[in-house]
Amino acid sequence: MSDHNEIAKQFVEYYYQAFGSDRNNLAPLYRDMSVMSWEGTPIQGAKNIVEKLVSLPFQRVAHKVTTIDTQPSLPNTNAIVIVVTGQLLVDEETKPQQYTQMFQLVQDNGFFIFNDIFRLNYA
Amino acid sequence: MSYNYGQGGRSRGRGRGRGRDQNGGGGHNPMFSRLGSESDSYGGPGAAGAGAAGGGAAFADTSMVGYTGGPVQVSIKGWGGGTESSLMRFLDNKTGRSVNIKSVNYRGDIMYVLVPSMDIAQELLKLSGIRFAGGKLIFQLKIPQVRFGADSTGRDMQGSSSTSESANIKDRLINLLQTRADMQGSSLDLSSLAQDNIIRSIGADPLRDGKIFKAILVIAEQIYPGLVTISFADNGLRSLRSIVDLGAHFPGLRNLSLMNNMISDFRELDCLSSAGSTAPLGQLAELILLGNPAREAELAQPGGGVSYVDKVHQRFPTVSMLDMNPVTPRAQPGLPAEVRSDGDAIKQLPFSTEQSFVENQGIGDMANTFLAGFFGLYDGNRSGLANIYDQEAQFSLMVDTSPPTNAFAQPKAQSQKHVDLSVYIRISRNLARVKSHIKRSSALTVGRDAIIQTISQLPATQHPVQDAQRFSFDAWQANVPGAQGVPLTVAILVIHGEFTELPSQNTISFDRVFALAPAQPGSAAASVGSPCVIVNDQLTLRRYNGFHSWLAMPADPPAAASGGLSPEQQEMARALQEQTGLNAEWTLKCLENYGWNYQLALSEFPQIRGTLPREAFQ
């Protein structure tokens, strides 16, 4: 596998950029087998996940990434685990909210998001 | 080969206990807990009542309620032009005696009072039609007068005959209620009904047919509309369907005992909660499930203490006393969680949060077992973790240096010294900052032995695992597509929480992501009773930021936590709270007292202010 650190970094940049501009653009990153847990609510499948993300109750959103870390996943898998922490700003809100998001990316042709666990954990 | 995360691993001893006694119920009186220990409140009809909202034992021991005449409930209409206190003075004047009203409840514009005797009630009835504060007062007895006058001794009633069987049953049930309610009409003991002579005399069998409960509740609402405490102990209840209307009859119910029944499935509770009722018990503060198979079975599970409280809070998030032990409620009674008194930061969350998510019970058990074992060793003996990390495991750590956004979250009674994270920053491999390939790879610790060495050099810690609310975790099972097309099973565990750094005594918030693989039979991990081995371990540290954000906000605050308030009522409550400085609970009481007439509540507030207890205010 090529440098998983660079993969993680580029992925995170791309993901939040797409999230901020048009959440529909995130659809190609998920597959039918993908699972997301959003604040404890499980959602499976690219279509459902993107629907959920698009339906979130804000118009504008910006993620300010504070930390990124990644590790290769299990031996004999082409997978990496990424942990991101950062701050979330929605709409006119000026007070940022801290969040943690964990991705497990799996490679087939390219990398896709296999697992996605999001928590706003520091109000 | 497939693995089952739900099996095995039970030998790891420490469950996450229930020891949360230090977090009290915020001023709530443990009503049931004092059962049978206080008799002085029941000094007879003349004794000063404690008031429905006050303290005191929730239950009258029936042997102590030895009154024969009994208080009589009277409804008063048409008093709205005046205040309660001016009305009382008025009645004292008109009757030429102290009416000695025991307690006051309101429903709409009707005031319900309990007067000590039938004589006084009769005097009040004679006053019906009298002018008061621009209106006409109408008094009505809430209990059929004929029965009351003829024979007021409930226990003697079962022998009397009646021409009208159904009226007779109703009257008997009224008598039953009178023997089982307290003086203030705020507490009702419906325990052991099968042994009750009145119940037997009407041929009901509560153990086989729950209809009698429905009938009792209908009548109880008529004569004790202000009921806050009720016990169904020792009734052999397997199902709660017979008391499904409890919340509709008594929306303000605060204390419920289901002790010593046969409830074997927590789902039975759904019919009293927002999960299965349109009138859930949104004000419930105290619940007793002692002596029910569902409770005992849950507590026998590993980590059962935590999951038991969780199962109760899923249904009744406002419960602050459970089985006579304080627990930390997830929501305050009466108002949406966002109006919680503990701070204002939470209302900005744009989506609902849940305390923990686990994909299924098996993985939840596994996670509980793993976490208790892991943090026990991490705090006590890190080299002991060698068995639990996979041979090729990886560990990395990063420091989030952004300032805490939650100012009120700082640990109480502890002024944090300067929090020095430099020891962690040295090995932080935050890719957003660290650009050097060399640093990036050197900061990733690979292999069991290297990991033990790295983590052993970190400052000693204490994770407050006994206090479950300080942690939130998400647990997933994933079958990662393998290189040879064979999926590999992995559990992903994301934990948020805090620990005390022992050398400095500072509290630090952390997130920790684990990828876990099943422990192979015969492996080191299996030999120490661990259900799994750690493959990935990613730790993020940050300045302390509290745990309030993951204390659940109900998905639907108005339904779940506000006891079914309409949007208008919630708006009124918010506005009144702002104007008066009352806390959530007393804001609601105040509005209910004034029939949800906001202007009236606001204009009367200066008069009642002095009469309210200090805990009524924020």
Image (cartoon, grey):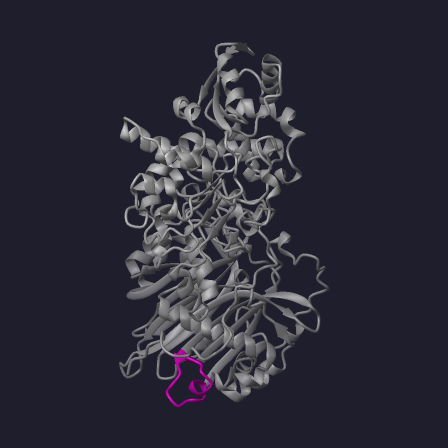
Q: Quadrant of the C terminus of chain B?
A: top right
Residue B164, position in %: x, y?
28, 27
B182 shown above or below B129: below
First to last magenta residue range: B517-533
Q: How many labels does the image show?
A: 0
Residue B481, position in %: x, y?
30, 77
Horizontally, residue A26 falls left or right of residue B547, namely: left
Horizontally, residue B294 falls left or right of residue B418, namely: left
Residue B531: say if magenta. yes
Q: Can residue A92 be seen in this view?
A: no
B618 shown above or below A67: above
Residue B267, position in %: x, y?
34, 55
Q: Residue at x 65, y 36 (%)?
A: B613
Residue B483, position in %: x, y?
31, 82
Q: Can residue B379 be seen in this view?
A: yes
Q: For this rendering, which residue is in front, B220 or B321?
A: B220
Residue B300: say if magenta. no
